[in-house]
Image (cartoon, rainbow, N blue to C red):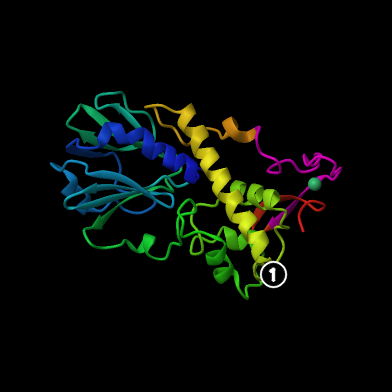
Amino acid sequence: MPELPEVETTRRGLTPHVIGRRIVEIVRRRADLRFPIPAQIDQLIGEPVLALRRRAKYLLLDSTRGSALLHLGMSGSLRIVSADAPVRTHDHVDLVLASGQAIRFHDPRRFGCLLWQPLRVVHPLLATLGPEPLEEAFDASYLAARFAGRSAQIKTALMDQRIVVGVGNIYASEALYRAGIDPRRAAGRVSRARLELLVDAVKEILAWAIGQGGTTLRDFVDPAGTPGYFAQSLKVYERAGEACLTAGCGGTIERAVLGQRASYFCRRCQR
Ligand SMILES: [Zn+2]
């Protein structure tokens, strides 16, 4: 599943190809993805792309009339192709640019979406989202305030998009390991000092993963590709039964299902 770093990598990869370019045609090869593709999307035709922004795992393609709102879902990807490039199975939509290129939306499982956000309106899908993890608003005092009194397990709370966006399962497991926090601990019972470590760990891991994506991908953007490029750097994720990598620990990585998601941790290093 494309996570925040892959979406940000996609944004960076597409940006030089789309900014200032006029959209001349929208080719729909089906009427819906996860949701129907609204007719309002045609307002983009004739409009230059003013900006390509990311909010959580959504991309917003801004024009003077409103914004296309895209989500890659479980298996989606966006590529820059020549507008006449042969169409593959599951290439559902093309946003054709005056440059002769097109942004091609490919999504085998169709959990992605292409929606419309009018000017001066926040789409309902974006309205309840928490802050971006890499922005300053996401800090230990914010997290302490949001976690106060909560008995939910901290890993589940950290993955709650209303609290902070874009901390997916892999990143939550890894950040809690780095911060030495047991993922099963009640969110409201973690000290401020440990939340400081957690915030730093989340920011470091996401920034690093974005950097990895940025060096791996060029104008061909395929965030649905395997996360193999960083798998070797993961300390706990999918390492159940293997030795903990903390020097001198000697423990074994365990797996537990928390909030219906596989979670990995070291009982000795994380409390
Ligand atoms: Zn350990």
Residue at 82% of width from left, 52% of height from top? 268
Quadrant holding the C terminus: bottom right
Q: Position of residue 225 (x, y in %)?
A: 50, 32
- Label 1 amino acid? Arg
Q: Can residue 172 be spotted in the picture?
A: yes
Q: Please state which of residues 116 and 247 is positioned toward the viewer in this rendering.
A: 247
Describe residue 125's horizontal placement relative to residue 50 as left or right: right
Q: Position of residue 231 (x, y in %)?
A: 63, 34
Based on the picture, tell me whether residue 126 belongs to the magenta stretch. no
Number of other residues with Cα within 10 Å of mark 1, as a class: few under 14, some 14 to 19, many 20 or more: some
Q: Relative to 28, is 196 above or below?
A: below
Q: Position of residue 136 (x, y in %)?
A: 46, 56
Describe residue 59's horizontal placement relative to residue 153 as left or right: left
Q: Can residue 2 be spotted in the picture?
A: no
Residue at 56% of width from left, 58% of height from top? 159
Which residues are the magenta region? 232-257
Q: Please state which of residues 145 and 63 is positioned toward the viewer in this rendering.
A: 145
Q: Which residue is mark 1?
A: 189
